[in-house]
Image (cartoon, grey):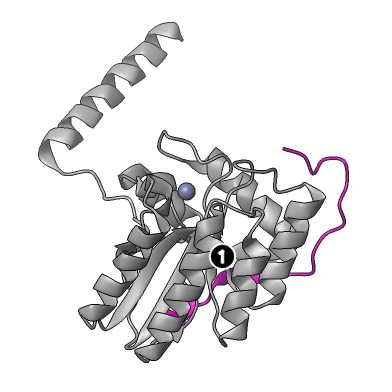
């Protein structure tokens, strides 16, 4: 029996070698990566790394301007998503029509795969009852493995074409200049990276960007909308009831 198994192993190894030499491996299916909007005269402002202290303020500025934004949430980064305040912020963002996106559970420096992805998805399914159709990899780092895993999870990947630099140490004035320089070039659309975890972004840069973009005729929409009206979620369901397993 042992010999038979060893022989089988030998044959399959030889087969694998032969196949590897003669034919190329079937390509794994990869998630679509979006770095820019599609629709004309639309701007999608995205806010990473929350839910955090200034989410509601950002939402208020957007809603007052008749606009929507996109929040790319972590499960356990600047705060635990299951804290009461965090849960309320997630609910607030969803209730005000903003798009909720997965930004992985813990914002790892390493390449995120399933374990980093399902935990934040589970949190959004529990708290507001949505399964996100989009994910943004931390630091914008991805490779084919991330794209394979995202595809298996039925998600597309969102990057950006404008980085305000707020998480890289840019001053408020520098981030405002990023917006004004971009708008001066009269782009068809804008997909901007911001972080909701800085008060300067929330209180100063966001109102500045909203006013500037609207003065040039850009509509402030979610990423899913600016991509031609894609579905933001794979499915929606009623929120679930918290229990002791909701922890970070
Ligand atoms: Zn991030």
Taking the image as shown, residue 246 lies to the left or right of residue 23, namely right
Residue 150 visible from this viewpoint: yes
The image quadrant of residue 64 is bottom right
Name the outermost residue toward the front. Answer: 173
Q: Is residue 6 left or right of residue 78?
A: left
- Residue 194 screen position, x and y as percent: 45, 60
User: From the viewer's perspective, is 167 left or right of 235?
Assistant: left
**At numbered mark 1, what does the secondary structure look like: helix, strand or loop?**
helix
Q: Position of residue 100 (x, y in %)?
A: 59, 65
Assess whether residue 202 is covered by the magenta stretch.
no
Most extreme residue toward the top is 2
Q: Quadrant of the C terminus?
A: top right
User: Against 243, is 189 above or below?
Assistant: below
Q: Which residue is found at the position 56% from the left and 56% from the top?
A: 199
Residue placed under numbered mark 1 in the picture: 203
- Which region shows up in magenta? 224-248
Q: Percent x, y for residue 225?
A: 47, 81
- The x, y position of residue 104, in whole percent, is 53, 47
Decide: is 91 above or below 152: below
Residue 236 at least partly seen: no
Q: Does residue 93 lie above or below 78 as drawn?
A: below
Q: Residue at x 35, y 85 (%)?
A: 39
Residue at point 56%, 65% (across, down): 203
Which sits in the foreground, 224 or 18? Answer: 224
- Name the one closer to the observer, 32 or 81: 81
Q: Nearer the viewer, residue 242 or 11?
A: 242
Is 244 a magenta residue? yes
Q: How many numbered callouts?
A: 1
Residue plotted at (78% across, 47% down): 83
Q: Residues within 10 Å of mark 1 (few under 14, many from 20)?
A: some
SS majority, magenta: loop
């Amino acid at each position: 029996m042992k010999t038979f198994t060893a022989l089988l192993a030998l044959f399959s190894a030889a087969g694998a070698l032969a196949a590897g030499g003669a034919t190329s491996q079937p390509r794994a299916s990869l998630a679509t990566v979006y770095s820019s909007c599609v629709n004309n005269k639309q701007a999608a402002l995205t806010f990473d790394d929350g839910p955090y202290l200034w989410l509601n303020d950002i939402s208020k500025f957007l809603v007052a301007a008749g606009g929507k934004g996109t929040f790319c949430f972590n499960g356990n980064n600047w705060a635990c998503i299951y804290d009461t305040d965090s849960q309320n912020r997630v609910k607030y963002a969803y209730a005000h029509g903003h798009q909720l996106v997965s930004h992985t559970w813990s914002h790892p420096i390493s390449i995120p795969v399933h374990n980093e992805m399902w935990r934040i998805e589970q949190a959004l399914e529990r708290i507001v009852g949505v399964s996100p159709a989009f994910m943004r990899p931390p630091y914008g780092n991805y490779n084919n493995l991330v794209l394979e895993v995202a595809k298996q999870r039925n998600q597309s990947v969102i990057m950006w074409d404008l980085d305000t630099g707020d998480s890289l140490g840019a001053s408020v004035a520098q981030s405002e200049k990023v917006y004004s320089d971009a708008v001066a070039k009269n782009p068809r659309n804008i997909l901007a990276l911001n972080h909701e975890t800085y008060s300067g972004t929330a209180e100063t840069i966001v109102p500045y960007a909203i006013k500037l973009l609207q003065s040039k005729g850009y509509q402030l929409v979610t990423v899913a909308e600016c991509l031609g009206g894609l579905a933001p979620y794979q499915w929606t369901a009623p929120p679930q009831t918290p229990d002791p397993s909701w922890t970070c």
